[in-house]
Amino acid sequence: MRDLGSHTKDLVSAVLSYEFDGGEIDAWAIDLVRGGEFAQWRDALTDSGLFTDNAVEVIGSAWRRDPELLVDALLDGADEVSRRRLKTMRRPSLLPVHIPADRIVGFG
C-alpha cells in the first residue's frame, strides 16, 4: 500500500492474511478485486476493530484508485508460486461472465 504507510500496510496484510488462514487464495476473489469489488475485505478491516471508520475509508479510497494494493495485501502471506500465478493478470476470456438470472433460459 504504497500511499498508506508501512504500519497501515502491515496491519491490513495481517488482518487479510488471517482471512485466508490455512486456505488457498481463490483466483476468482482476486479477479473480483481487480473488477472493483472489495466490500467484503473492507468489512473484514472494520470487523477487526483495529481501524477507525476514517482509516477504513482512506484504505477503501486507495483500493478504488489502485485495486492492486488490495491484491498485494491478499497475497502477502502466499507462497511464491501462488503469488506469481495470481499477480499475473488473467486473460479476459478466462474471467467469469456475469449473466443476470432473468436471461438464463429455464432458471427460476
Image (cartoon, grey):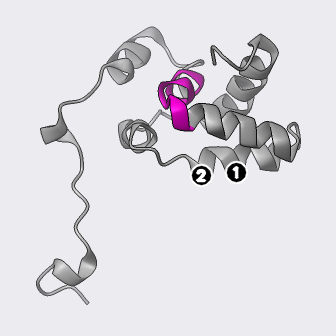
Please name the amino acid that badge 1 sits on.
Answer: Asp
Q: Which residue is mark 2?
A: 39
Queried whether the magenta region covers residue 67, the answer comes back as yes
Looking at the rendering, the stretch of residues picked out in magenta corresponds to 64-73
48 relative position to 68: left or right: right
Percent coordinates x, y for residue 100 in the rendering:
26, 73
Q: Position of residue 3 (x, y in %)?
A: 67, 17
Of helix, strand and loop, which mostly describes the magenta segment?
helix
**Which x, y percent locates residue 91?**
18, 31
Q: CA distance from mark 1 to mark 2?
A: 6 Å
Q: Position of residue 74 (x, y in %)?
A: 56, 28
> Pointer 1: what residue?
43
In the rendered structure, which amino acid carries the disc numbered 2?
A: Ala
Q: How many numbered dots are placed on residues in this image?
A: 2
Label 2 Cα crowd, 10 Å radius (few <14 / some 14-19 / many 20+):
few
Taking the image as drawn, is residue 21 in sight? Answer: no
Q: Secondary structure at mark 2?
A: helix
Q: Would residue 63 appear left or right of 92 to someone viewing this image?
A: right
